[in-house]
Image (cartoon, rainbow, N blue to C red):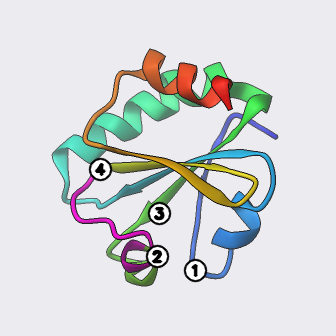
Amino acid sequence: MASEITELTEETFDQAVASGVALVDFWATWCGPCKTMGALLESQVAPAVGDHARVCKVNIDEQPGLAVRFEVQAIPTLVLFKDGKQVESLLGVQKPEELVKKVKAL
C-alpha cells in the first residue's frame, strides 16, 4: 500500500476497504473544515501510516449514495474500516497524531 490518498466511488469503495485497515474521509469541495482535514491527511496522516493502512476520500457531492450508506450527517466525517467492517466514525477536523494512533492500533 502506498501513502497517497485514493479517491473512491461507489464502484471502487467495497474493494478498497475489504481487507486491512482503511481511513475514509467523507468531504466536499465547498467545505472549509474538509479542506483543512484533507491537507492534514495528505501532509501528515498518509505518510505516517504508510503501508499500515489506506487513506481514502469520498466526495459526498459526487458519491451521495456512499454518504447515505454510511449515514454521513456532517462533514468532514472520517470512518475507520478493518477488513471491510466499520470500526469507528469521527466527526470534524481531527488531530493528525490521534488519527495515526487510531489507525496503527487496528
Q: Residue at x 76, y 62 (%)?
A: 18
Q: Which residues are magenta?
A: 67-76
Tag 3 and tag 2, C-beta contact below 8 Å: yes
Give the residue furthest to the top. Answer: 97
* Marks 2/4: CA–CA distance: 14 Å
Q: Earlier in the sequence, mark 2 or mark 4?
A: 2
**Relative image position of residue 63 (x, y in whole percent):** 43, 78
The amino acid at mark 3 is Val
Within 10 Å of disc 1 (Cα), the crowding (few <14, some 14-19, many 20+) is: some
**Amino acid of disc 4:** Pro
The residues bearing labels 2 and 1 have C-alpha atoms spaced at a distance of 6 Å
Q: Is residue 84 magenta?
A: no
Q: Earlier in the sequence, mark 1 or mark 4?
A: 1
Q: Residues within 10 Å of mark 2 (few under 14, many from 20)?
A: some
Question: Which is in the foreground here, disc 3 or disc 2?
Answer: 2
Q: Nearer the viewer, residue 23 or 43?
A: 23
Split into 4 quadrants, where in the image is the N terminus?
top right
Q: CA distance from mark 3 to mark 2?
A: 8 Å
Q: Which residue is mark 2?
A: 66
**Residue 67 lies in what quarter of the image?**
bottom left
Q: Check disc 1 and give the amino acid type.
A: Glu
Which quadrant of the figure has residue 83?
A: bottom right
- Numbered tag placed on residue 10 in the rendering: 1
Q: Residues within 10 Å of mark 4 (few under 14, many from 20)?
A: many
Total marks in image: 4
In the picture provided, is 63 more to the left or to the right than 35? right
CB atoms at circles 2 and 1 under 8 Å apart? yes
Q: Which element is circle 1 on?
A: loop
Residue hosting label 4: 76
Q: Which mark is residue 58?
A: 3
